[in-house]
Image: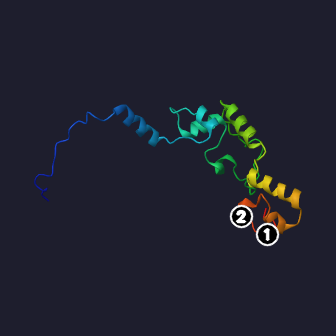
Amino acid sequence: MPKAKGKTRRQKFGYSVNRKRLNRNARRKAAPRIECSHIRHAWDHAKSVRQNLAEMGLAVDPNRAVPLRKRKVKAMEVDIEERPKELVRKPYVLNDLEAEASLPEKKGNTLSRDLIDYVRYMVENHGEDYKVSGSGPVGWLGRRPGPFAA
């Protein structure tokens, strides 16, 4: 099929394009940023994902890392060949991950500090008298008399 007349154009070199930034951005898109800082610092870009994770003592495929035991046929002790364990060259990554996972979880479902102080002030001064606590001098928040919803 013939091309439309005047639509083909010779490609010209773009002198205004920053080639270094262009290549750097292409590299970043091809290999996205690893969120875990321990793994990111130990990562070797010259190696594959499987090799990197094996050196850190991590598994690529959890199904192969922990195989299911088949109980159908018991092999003789002579026939059992153990697979050679993969050498962990970077055990500090695994130790850092375990230490981070063993830290206590931060409780994040608490109220704000100023709301806690406000409720504490009202309970200390007025107790269960909600009408007085709603119309007091600190009632500037527009609270209506009623139990505190905490």
- Which residue is painted at 70% across and 48% down in the image? 66
Residue 35's x, y, as percent?
A: 59, 42
**Which label was assigned to residue 114?**
none
Q: How many marks?
A: 2
Q: Secondary structure at mark 2?
A: loop
Mark 2 surroundings: few (<14), some (14-19) or many (≥20) residues within 10 A: few
Residue closer to the observer: 127 or 2 = 127
Query: Which residue is identified by label 2?
Result: 142
Q: Seen in the image, is 143 located left or right of residue 31?
A: right
Task: Give 66 or 25, whichever is nearer the viewer.
Answer: 25
Q: Where is residue 57 shown, x and y percent of the image? A: 67, 37
In terms of image quadrants, where is residue 77? Answer: top right
Q: Is residue 40 above or below residue 3?
A: above
Q: Quadrant of residue 147?
A: bottom right
Display coloring: rainbow
The residue depicted at 62 percent of the width and 40 percent of the height is 36
Relative image position of residue 4 (x, y in whole percent): 13, 56
Is disc 1 placed on a helix, strand or loop? Answer: loop
> Which residue corresponds to the image point at 73% horizontal and 55% vertical from the top-left?
70
- For mark 1, what is the residue? 145
**Label 1, label 2: how many angstroms apart (C-alpha)?**
10 Å
Q: Amino acid at mark 2?
A: Gly
Quadrant holding the N terminus: bottom left
Q: Quadrant of the C terminus?
A: bottom right
Q: Nearer the viewer, residue 3 or 22?
A: 22
Image spot of residue 95 (x, y percent): 73, 35
Label 1 neighbour load within 10 Å: few <14, some 14-19, many 20+: some
Task: Name the kind of residue labelled 1 in the image.
Answer: Pro
